[in-house]
Amino acid sequence: MATSRTECQALDAQDPLRSFREEFSLPPGIVYLLGNSLGALPRRTPERVARTVETEWGVHLGASWNTAGWWDLPQTTGDRLAPLIGAGPGQVLAGDSTSVCIFKAVAAALPLRPGRNVIISDLDNFPTDRYVVEGAAQALGAYEIRDIGSPDESLDEALGDDVALVLLSQVDYRTGAARDMAAVTARVHAAGALMIWDLCHSTGALNVDVGDADFALGCTYKYLNGGPGAPAYIYVAPRHQEAARNVLSGWHGHAAPFAFESHYRPADGVRRFASGSPPVLSYAALNASLDIWEGVDMSEVRAKSQALTSLFIELLDELHPGLTLATPRDPGRRGSQVSYRHPDGYPVIRALADRGVVGDFREPDFIRFGFAPLYLRYVDVHDAATALAEVLAKELWRDEKYARRLTVT
């Protein structure tokens, strides 16, 4: 028999992460299962942003580039993000968007493998990854894209002595299936290629370890709660930092920006991957959230993530058997997300939102639910599964108003 609501309340009382829920501003009556797309608002963020606007900008003006550390935000914020992906100081730079960071990583990696002209990409990857690879291949020379599909058995067939790099996501954005980073990286390196990881759907939800990866990147507005448009980040392995070139060579990555030299001269280390001036207000919001994350034990986060996702699957197995699960049942093989397939997934998600449970839809038929362990409770999972089962059993999604597509699904 599935876990009862009373049992879920008992689990919440014993949860070692339960106090972190108070750090977030959550609308009453809402079960928010969209932390894998946009994280909830930390309560401390409005004050931090207001201070940046009203005092650092409003009072101290341009002096804050020095006094408030604005100029160094890409590095200082990157160093705060580094432990969340198993990296060290001076290895991560925060800034730009995920798409820009992908381009920078791909463009830097390709020249490190001269004589190789193939980029391996995953057709099931988040589309921007594939789009950026297409653009980079066209812009940088005669590069071929070799696509693989999931699962990764086809990776070994695609690898060869013509492959320069492989770009994959640790967690599949549609299904939540998780890859073994260390094992995949080892296979890629054994073929003489470089490994770039997209960590957007795993940072802040899994015990991420970049390990021997050459480059990695990710966003901070999902599980890390940095806010819409929050800076992304790029990791560059120390062994590549002096040889790798940032093709978007802006003044912020110059060795001496205020010397205003006529020609580009790259800064030492990961700083050379900076381009333009930092968006200070966005960094303020992100750093407010990172204040919370510095007190988090990621092992506890991962354990709760696996427990929450397992509970959701268990409940729906009983409440609505026959719903097609797209996510691996093995907790060790999934991220912090559960996805189901339904031919009318979009109106199902719309109907569910009207009952206070927020998930989302991805083409062609995936309904997705993200589980952010810092603020999600076991009782929330119980209520969400119950509501979804009701929407499906009573076919509440058939109301015509739910069929109209919104711009963001």
Image (cartoon, rainbow, N blue to C red):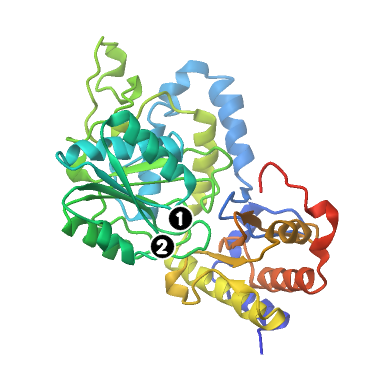
- Up the image or down, 276 lies above or below 376; here it is above
| Residue 89, picture quadrant | top left
Residue 289 position in % (x across, y down): 53, 47
Q: Residues within 10 Å of mark 1 (few under 14, many from 20)?
A: some
Q: Nearer the viewer, residue 399 or 296?
A: 399
| Residue denoted by label 2 | 150
- Up the image or down, 373 lies above or below 197; here it is below
Relative placement, left or right, of 339 versus 240 is: right
Residue 300 position in % (x across, y down): 47, 69
| Residue 93, picture quadrant | top left
Relative placement, left or right, of 166 versus 385 is: left
Query: How far is disc 2 from disc 1 in space, using C-alphas?
Result: 7 Å
Residues marked 2 and 1 touching at CB (< 8 Å): yes
| Residue denoted by label 1 | 124
Amino acid under label 2? Ser
Q: Nearer the viewer, residue 239 or 23?
A: 239
Q: Residue at x 61, y 25 (%)?
A: 54
Q: Residues within 10 Å of mark 2 (few under 14, many from 20)?
A: few
- Among the two numbered marks 2 and 1 on one chain, the one whose residue lies closer to the N terminus: 1
| Residue 184, picture quadrant | bottom left
Q: Secondary structure beneath disc 1?
A: loop
**Image quadrant for the N terminus?**
bottom right
Residue 344 position in % (x across, y down): 71, 61
Q: Residue at x 44, y 54 (%)?
A: 203
Amino acid under label 1? Asp
